[in-house]
Image: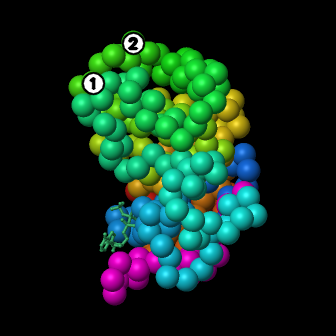
Amino acid sequence: MLKLENINTFYGNIQALKDLSLEVQEGEIITLIGANGAGKTTTLMSICGIEQPRSGRVIFEGQDITETAPDKIVSMGISQVPEGRRIFPKLTVAENLDMGAFLRNDKEEIARDLEYIFELFPRLAERRHQQGGTLSGGEQQMLAISRALMGKPRLLLLDEPSLGLAPLIVKQIFEIIVKINKENNTTVFLVEQNANMALKIAHRGYVLQNGAVTMTDDADKLMANEEVKAAYLGL
Ligand code: ATP
């Protein structure tokens, strides 16, 4: 479904990604784990057209999208849930969700998707007329995921959904990510510093170190790997 081929992305003279290659198959949950500053966010930005790689290619469903504009990429079926959620704090929950669907005009399906989201996150249904900024951190994360789902993505990019949330809320959010993957047939690319949680729900994983992929395997094999255990799982 998605292929990154030898991506090199720079910020001025700083090389954030070094010959990064990876693949995501349709239906998978893939996780990219790595320390602070390893290049995880830059990888997502390079996929969704916000940071242009200096070289290499991003291929989505057979099409080269390396130089495609971000809004076009969303309309092709890739939505991102950014780090720190970035919901619109002054808009209500319902208005935030509308914003996620702004590129669509299939009204009936939008209404069905909204219903699905309110089933998935009953808290958001209860709070649909409340301003986004008044929600708790966990609810804001739910809103950010839901807003991305309103774009009707086939591929959902998630940037550190666990950031700043209590363990119980993280568990709930990760359970819902699994549900979205299974029930809604949405392929998931999950970037996480919480490698433990991410590897538990992922099918496969990539380890990113200083902008380069250093390891890739099935998630359960990565979890059992001594290097991964010592560096990322705190074991
Ligand atoms: P984090 O978990 O902290 O978000 P990350 O793995 O997502 O880290 P990136 O944010 O992709 O890492 O950063 C990769 C490298 O690029 C880091 O060295 C970072 O300092 C640098 N970097 C990121 N954004 C910029 C920017 N806008 N300008 C300059 N350097 C940047």
The tag on residue 131 is: 1
Q: Amino acid at mark 1?
A: Gln
Q: Which residues are magenta?
A: 1-22
Answer whether residue 129 is visible to the viewer in this image: yes
Which x, y percent locates residue 156? 57, 46
State which mark lies toward you, 1 or 2: 1
**Which residue shows up at 35% across the image and 68% down it?**
37
Towards the viewer: 197 or 4: 4
Tell me the quarter of the picture where residue 204 sits.
bottom right
Which x, y percent locates residue 27? 72, 46
Which x, y percent locates residue 143? 41, 31
Q: Main secondary structure of the magenta part?
A: strand
Residue sticking out furthest to the front: 105
Q: CA distance from mark 1 to mark 2?
A: 12 Å
Q: Is residue 13 above or below residue 150?
A: below
The count of marks equals 2
Which x, y percent locates residue 24? 68, 58
Instruction: Answer left or right for 82 relative to 61.
Output: left
- Magenta segment includes 223: no
